[in-house]
Image (cartoon, helix red, strand yellow):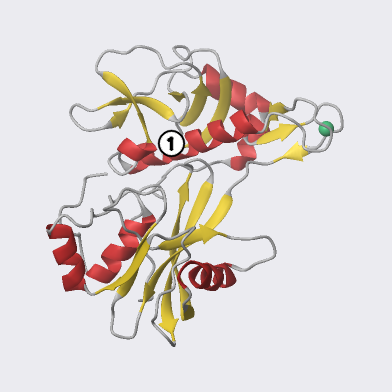
Amino acid sequence: MSDTLEWLALARGTLDRAALKRRDEAWLEAAWADESTRVLVVESGQALVRFDPGPKLFLVSPQEAPEGDRYFLGIDDKDIAYFAVTAPLPAVEDAQPAGLRRVGALLEDLDSGLLTHAVALEHWHATNGFCPRCGTASTIASAGHVRVCPNDGTEQFPRVDPAVIMLVQDDDGRILLARGPQWPEDRRSILAGFVEPGESLEQAVAREVYEEVGLAVRDVRYLGSQPWPLPQSLMIGFFARADGSLELRPDPEEILDAAWYTRDQLTEAIEAGQIVAPGPLSIAAQLIMRWYGGELPNMPPF
Ligand SMILES: [Zn+2]
């Protein structure tokens, strides 16, 4: 298993982020004055979506946008600028509030990228309002991609927490699935965990697998990544092969159940209702599908 994943629900953004424009106040002002500019209103991780005929973000012009913090998201291939504004979602006929979990896999590429970027920034601003050095309330700069302390000039950049997620396979082609402590009884997935300070991604993969189920691994290989702003992770997907003993020793604080599955065993378990297939939004589902050779039975649409 070596080719990287081709489709990841939240890694499909098509905008040019045009980062150099973020500090160009004259350009930003002109873009905001242009009524062809599109604005996505976000509130607590949700935006308005029209589901008929297919899920599509409800965007407005700058003139129609409510007052709120403004983030520049980028420009499309027709030079249309896109912004997000944080404000209470307006009441719009035929549109409903929805977040990434519901529509992240269903939206078209452009919209999926807009919502992913906007809610990631919204969460970061909402939880990082003060200078980490002196505690003064910081202000938004760089069109929403920096916060600056007015007291000492400290700049903060949007934080992303890297997490590794790994499909562990044995020499017979079985994969390891496990259940986390807070999960529903029928939910299983592959192992994952946050990268620690001073650690490489490959080291994090090996450490997490050992901590969670007591296995050693080898052949750790990168397979793809997707932002996971739920609320602020980057999921980095790997393949790893179990090395040596296949005996599983789950850490009861992190893992309630862990087992090896062949394709037939997984198919049977899902069809018997013992396991619910993960939806296509997660990189876990995409990694499992890569191994499985296609869609799992009874996959939910999101
Ligand atoms: Zn400060």
Residue 6 in sight in this render: no
At label 1, which amino acid type do we have?
Leu
Residue under the image location 48 percent in, 30 percent down:
81
Judged from the image, the quadrant occupied by ligand 1 is top right
Location of residue 74 with respect to 228 vertically, above or below:
above
Q: What residue do we see at 47% from left, 58% from top?
A: 254
In the image, residue 169 sits, relative to residue 116, either above or below, namely below
Percent from the top left, x then y, of residue 177? 33, 65
Q: Where in the figure is residue 293, as x and y percent of width and height?
A: 22, 69
Residue farthest along the front direction in this orientation? 252
Left or right: where does residue 49 sit relative to residue 34? left
Image location (x, y in percent) of residue 295: 20, 59
Task: Answer with left or right where residue 138 lies relative to residue 78.
Answer: right
Outermost residue, right side: 152
Q: Quadrant of residue 98?
A: top left
Residue at x 56%, y 71% (from the top left corner):
207
Quarter of the image with the C terminus is top left
Q: Is residue 276 above or below residue 302?
A: below
Q: Residues within 10 Å of mark 1 (few under 14, many from 20)?
A: many
Residue 131 percent coordinates (x, y): 77, 33
Q: Secondary structure at mark 1?
A: helix
**From this viewpoint, which residue is outermost toward the bottom?**
244
Residue at the image position 42 percent from the left and 17 percent from the top? 89
Residue 152 vs residue 185, the one in the foreground = 185
The residue carrying mark 1 is 114
Quadrant of the frame with the N terminus: bottom left
**Snapshot quadrant of residue 20:** top right
Residue 230 in sight in this render? yes
Between 194 and 4, the one lying in front of the other is 194
